[in-house]
Image (cartoon, helix red, strand yellow):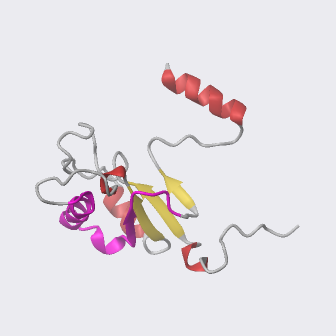
């Protein structure tokens, strides 16, 4: 049996995308929204991992911080704040894209994700996580 192609025609360049959540995965977000800035430190292991992964994957950062309807903070958009933070941490050159939308990706790395195997398992996971 042949493998089902998951990538739409014309989007083959996206077959090697790796989507990584920003808050809680790269950037510590222990204060939540706080004042809208990117206040946190880099999470241990993120720098080396992203540098290594960028050799094999197109790295896409996704975060609600860059949604167009987010307020301007200190005269900057969320995208500008995230870009500035990634630049300060020496990571910007390893990032191919920053988006607020779920991108096409081979894999997703997210601290709030639930691995789907079945709805029964998902409902149990949610119940256990919500307690």
Q: Which residues are magenta?
A: 77-103
Which quadrant: the N terminus? bottom right
Q: Residue at x 33, y 48 (%)?
A: 23
Q: Is residue 30 left or right of residue 116?
A: left
Q: Is residue 14 above or below residue 43?
A: below
Q: Residue at x 34, y 56 (%)?
A: 46
Q: Is residue 86 left or right of residue 63?
A: left
| Residue placed furthest toward the top | 131
Is residue 101 one of those drawn in magenta?
yes
Front position in the image: 107 or 99: 99
Q: Residue at x 25, y 41 (%)?
A: 33
Is residue 45 one of those drawn in magenta?
no
Q: Which quadrant holds residue 3?
A: bottom right
Q: Is residue 18 left or right of residue 64?
A: right
Q: Which quadrant holds residue 115?
A: top right
Task: Give x and y (percent) for residue 78.
Answer: 25, 57
Q: Tag count in the figure? A: 0
Task: Give x and y (percent) for residue 43.
Answer: 30, 49
Front position in the image: 39 or 80: 80
| Residue placed furthest toward the right | 1
Task: Give x and y (percent) for residue 130.
Answer: 50, 23
| Residue placed furthest toward the front | 69
Q: Residue at x 34, y 63 (%)?
A: 48
Q: Is residue 35 above or below residue 103?
A: above
Task: Give x and y (percent) for residue 112.
Answer: 46, 41
């Amino acid at each position: 049996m042949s493998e089902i192609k998951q990538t739409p025609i014309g989007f083959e360049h996206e077959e090697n995308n790796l989507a990584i959540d920003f808050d809680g995965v790269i950037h510590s977000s222990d204060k939540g929204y706080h004042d809208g800035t990117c206040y946190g430190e880099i999470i241990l292991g993120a720098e080396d991992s992203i540098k290594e992964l960028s050799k094999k994957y197109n790295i896409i950062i996704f975060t609600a911080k860059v949604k167009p309807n987010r307020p301007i903070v200190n005269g900057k958009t969320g995208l500008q704040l995230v870009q500035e933070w990634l630049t300060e941490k020496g990571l910007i050159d390893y990032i191919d894209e920053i988006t607020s939308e779920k991108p096409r990706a081979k894999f997703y790395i997210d601290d709030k994700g639930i691995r789907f195997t079945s709805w029964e398992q998902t409902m149990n996971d949610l119940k256990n996580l919500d307690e």
